[in-house]
Image (cartoon, coloured by chain):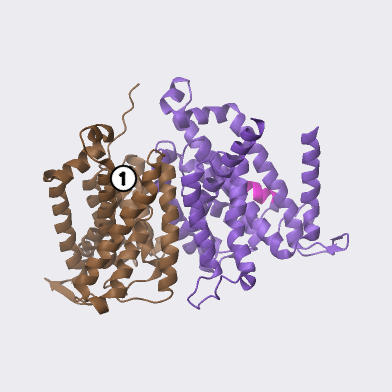
């Protein structure tokens, strides 16, 4: 029982990080209708900048720089590439981001090589213990940051002019544009926001218990895809719930590896995808996604 | 008349090439042919049916491992057919999802298959040999074995495994292109094209949307399976890593570069994507730009990744129809 609770809580904290990355996917999709495969390399870019600069700048400044660089890179992708082909179909846009991902990822993995770059987080490899449940400090902080960010974003979407602009652009771009909302600007902002979220996700995914920034860290963003699909593409709430679910599923299956050994080793990595396929069998548009209704 | 002459010339050239090509080029060509078959299948799915799949590496793996497993038990030609059927069956089993989920959403859902597939390949060691992989029986047709045995030589050129497999590959690719072209122009092909442009219109015209989508996915996965068989034969030994997410991405990129929906374009895209890293690596010693691996500069592998990524971006920004679109435009200008 104790093990179960420990795993469940560990899974929730890991899931909180996935939620952030998934939220980035959904933000971009709502604002520009693009499924952004470059999210993984943005994540790695943020983590890489933090890892390379924390010694000279100090950790807080390095984190700020990492977030700004990732946000700027994402916004640039939108302004330089996506804006030119705004009217293209979903598949074309998705594959375009795949191309960007390949370019950025190749350069980053070339720079990282076989190194493991420490992220230099001040919380190090500490462990918090409450009532016999042990969780890595970095994960607890990640959970807190994720909660704060999600709340702040929800509030911003609801109450600020910027949030209203984003929501109306997502709802009906043409009308929003007629009302004086600059679609290009909201789109770039959405991409920047997603880049920043990816960088924060990267920061926590590469700190303890992970060893540091490696060339493969970008693959982690792929694990956010089941979260997005589970939640339904156009639902921010769905992304958060999907992220948490995926976190719990992957930690639980990894934790009960011994009991589940008949399913093979390394189950934690595939379980999220298996859950995604099962959910799609029952609900093709995800748990919270808008169902497509066709009128003739 | 011209067409018949051109076809005859192509056949003669294809038949004569193994006399001149070194084994490196034959090997590269075989990998490209395997990729071509799989890419044509994906192109039919994406370009004609409007569905997207990031899961085709899974079906390629089923074809490859299916053949490797069956060829030790039944005659290789039967194993080839059975492996293709097996890939088709796997595609059909996915139909509850492939029939209902549309376009890019299907692409992301099918991503799950690749990871499930990797998991199975790593763990079902009895059939797949786990990470060590499994050796592939050479192909055998009516007692003629496609391997290095026997002292077959043509015009003084010794014919080994690669030379023999070349002909098998050419035949399989030809069948794949022929079938694909016919499918596009047939009644089901037109039904799928309507379905891609408007599901409602297709439904109204009496097209069973769910069934057709599932069927398109099944046919496409059979193509992938056939590509897998040829890939297995070309490798001689197959390991799970060859069938991961990267292969799925490669296949998608092949048809984007070639032009989705075009059978010939898919084949050209497959040739480009497969041959690029191999050729760059082959000549890396004599290319001044490229650094030795591990020296911190840009090596052949990275350089080919850069070209590859840049090609995707450039094609989608400037030539959305891919190579097939460019060819069509050139033809139109010549006529005008």
Is residue A143 found left or right of B19 in the rendered image?
left
Q: What element carries label 1?
A: helix
Magenta segment, prevailing SS (helix, strand or loop): helix
Subunit ID for the residue under disc 1: A
Where does the image place residue B119, in percent across and percent down from the top left? 44, 60
Query: Is residue B116 positioned above or below A259 on the image?
Result: above
Stretch in magenta: B77-82
Tell me where residue B186 sits by quadrant.
top right
Chain A drawn colour:
brown
- Label 1: how many Cα within 10 Å (few below 14, some 14–19, many 20+): many
Tell me where residue A255 sits by quadrant.
bottom left
Magenta includes B208? no
Is residue A159 found left or right of B96 in the rendered image?
left
Where does the image place residue B39, in percent across and percent down from the top left? 57, 47
Query: Is residue B119 positioned above or below A159 on the image?
Result: below
Residue B88 visible (yes or no): no
Q: Residue at x 29, y 35 (%)?
A: A291
Mark 1 — residue? A29
Shown in purple, the chain is B
On-image quarter of the N terminus of chain B = top right
């Amino acid at each position: 029982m104790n093990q179960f609770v420990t795993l469940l809580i560990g899974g929730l904290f890991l899931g909180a990080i996935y939620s952030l990355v998934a939220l980035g996917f959904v933000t971009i999709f709502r604002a520009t209708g693009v499924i952004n495969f470059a999210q993984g390399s943005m994540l790695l870019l943020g983590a890489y900048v933090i890892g390379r600069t924390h010694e000279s700048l100090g950790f807080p400044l390095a984190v700020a720089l990492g977030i700004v660089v990732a946000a700027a890179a994402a916004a640039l992708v939108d302004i330089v590439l996506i804006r030119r082909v705004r009217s293209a179909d979903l598949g074309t846009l998705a594959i375009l981001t795949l191309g960007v991902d390949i370019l950025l990822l190749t350069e980053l993995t070339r720079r990282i090589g076989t190194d493991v770059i420490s992220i230099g987080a001040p919380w190090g490899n500490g462990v918090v213990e409450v009532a016999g449940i042990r969780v890595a400090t970095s994960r607890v902080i990640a959970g807190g940051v994720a909660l704060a960010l999600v709340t702040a974003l929800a509030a911003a979407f609801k109450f600020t002019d910027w949030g209203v602009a984003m929501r109306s652009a997502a709802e009906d771009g043409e009308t929003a544009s007629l009302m004086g909302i600059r679609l290009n600007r909201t789109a770039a902002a959405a991409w920047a926001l997603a880049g920043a979220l990816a960088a924060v996700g990267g920061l926590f995914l590469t700190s303890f218990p992970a060893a540091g920034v490696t060339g493969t860290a970008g693959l982690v963003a792929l694990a956010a895809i089941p979260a997005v699909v589970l939640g339904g593409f156009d639902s921010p709430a769905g992304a958060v719930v999907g992220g948490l679910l995926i976190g719990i599923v992957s930690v639980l299956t990894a934790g009960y590896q011994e009991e589940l050994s008949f399913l093979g080793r390394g189950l934690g990595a595939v379980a999220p995808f298996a859950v995604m396929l099962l959910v799609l069998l029952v609900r093709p548009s995800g748990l919270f996604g808008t169902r497509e209704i066709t009128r003739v | 008349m011209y067409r018949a002459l051109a076809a005859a010339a192509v056949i003669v050239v294809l038949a004569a090439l193994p006399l001149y090509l070194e084994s490196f080029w034959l090997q590269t060509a075989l990998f490209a042919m395997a990729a071509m078959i799989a890419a044509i299948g994906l192109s039919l799915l994406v370009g004609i049916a409007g569905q997207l799949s990031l899961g085709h590496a899974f079906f390629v793996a089923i074809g490859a491992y299916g053949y490797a497993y069956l060829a030790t038990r039944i005659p290789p030609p039967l194993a080839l057919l059975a492996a293709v059927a097996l890939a088709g069956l796997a595609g059909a089993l996915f139909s509850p999802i492939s029939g209902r989920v549309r376009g890019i959403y299907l692409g992301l859902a099918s991503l799950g298959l690749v990871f499930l597939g990797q998991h199975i390949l790593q763990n079902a060691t009895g059939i797949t040999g786990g990470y060590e992989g499994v050796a592939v029986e050479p192909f055998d047709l009516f007692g003629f074995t496609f391997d290095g045995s026997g002292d077959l030589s043509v015009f003084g050129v010794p014919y080994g495994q690669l030379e023999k497999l070349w002909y098998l590959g050419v035949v399989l690719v030809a069948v794949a292109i022929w079938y694909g072209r016919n499918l596009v122009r047939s009644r089901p092909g037109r039904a799928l094209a309507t379905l891609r442009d408007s599901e409602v219109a297709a439904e109204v015209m009496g097209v069973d949307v769910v069934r057709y989508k599932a069927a398109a996915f099944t046919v496409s996965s059979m193509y992938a399976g056939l590509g897998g068989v040829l890939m297995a034969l070309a490798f001689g030994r197959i390991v799970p890593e060859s069938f991961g997410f990267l292969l799925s991405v490669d296949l998608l990129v092949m048809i984007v570069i070639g032009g989705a929906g075009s059978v010939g374009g898919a084949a050209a895209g497959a040739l480009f994507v497969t041959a690029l890293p191999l050729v760059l690596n082959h000549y890396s010693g004599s290319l001044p730009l490229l650094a030795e691996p591990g020296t911190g500069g840009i090596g052949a592998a990275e350089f080919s990744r850069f070209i590859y990524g840049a090609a995707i971006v450039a094609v989608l920004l400037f030539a959305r129809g891919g190579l097939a679109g460019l060819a069509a435009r050139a033809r139109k200008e010549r006529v005008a």
